[in-house]
Amino acid sequence: MAPNGSTALLGAQDGQRAEQGAEVGTTEGQAALHEIWMAETRESAYKAFDRCVRRFEAKYPKATECLMKDKDAMLAFYDFPAVHWQHIRTTNPIESLRVLFPAACGE
């Protein structure tokens, strides 16, 4: 299946954020992003996002500007039912397919 415009855009944004966010302290930056990405609810994710921006905005203005600009696209998976979030969050499409179609993958 060919990626649609949204998935292609999200992939490009991920690369851009990675470059701009590389300077963010690995442990604390990753923990803040993980808190957003793995939030239990949309509301929790948005609160974690706001905390992350406040925490890093002064020190990393370009990275936080990029995050703020792409906030809705980054958190769009919260529009889907929660049972699908784990599959949407994965960065490994093969593992995602194995979870969705275990019989076809010989499991």
Image (spheres, grey):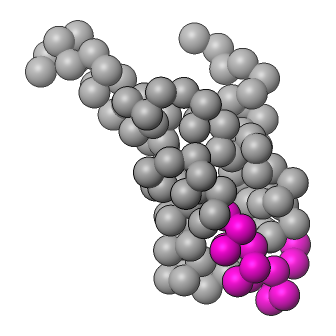
Q: Residue 82: horizontal and vertical position, in percent?
A: 43, 34
Q: How many marks?
A: 0
Q: Is residue 80 visible?
A: yes
Q: Residue 35: horizontal and vertical position, in percent?
A: 50, 65
Q: Residue at x 42, y 29 (%)?
A: 84
Q: Is residue 16 above or below residue 11?
A: below
Q: Residue at x 76, y 51 (%)?
A: 71
Identify which residue, 106 or 28, lies in the foreground.
28
Magenta region, main secondary structure: helix
Judged left or right of residue 44, residue 11 is right
Q: Quadrant of the N terminus?
A: top right
Span colored in magenta: 49-62
Q: Residue at x 71, y 68 (%)?
A: 50
Judged left or right of residue 30, residue 85 is left
Judged left or right of residue 21, residue 44 is left
Q: Residue furthest bottom?
A: 59
Among the 4 quarters of the image, the one containing residue 64: bottom right
Identify which residue, 105 or 29, lies in the foreground.
29
Q: Residue 44: horizontal and vertical position, in percent?
A: 55, 57
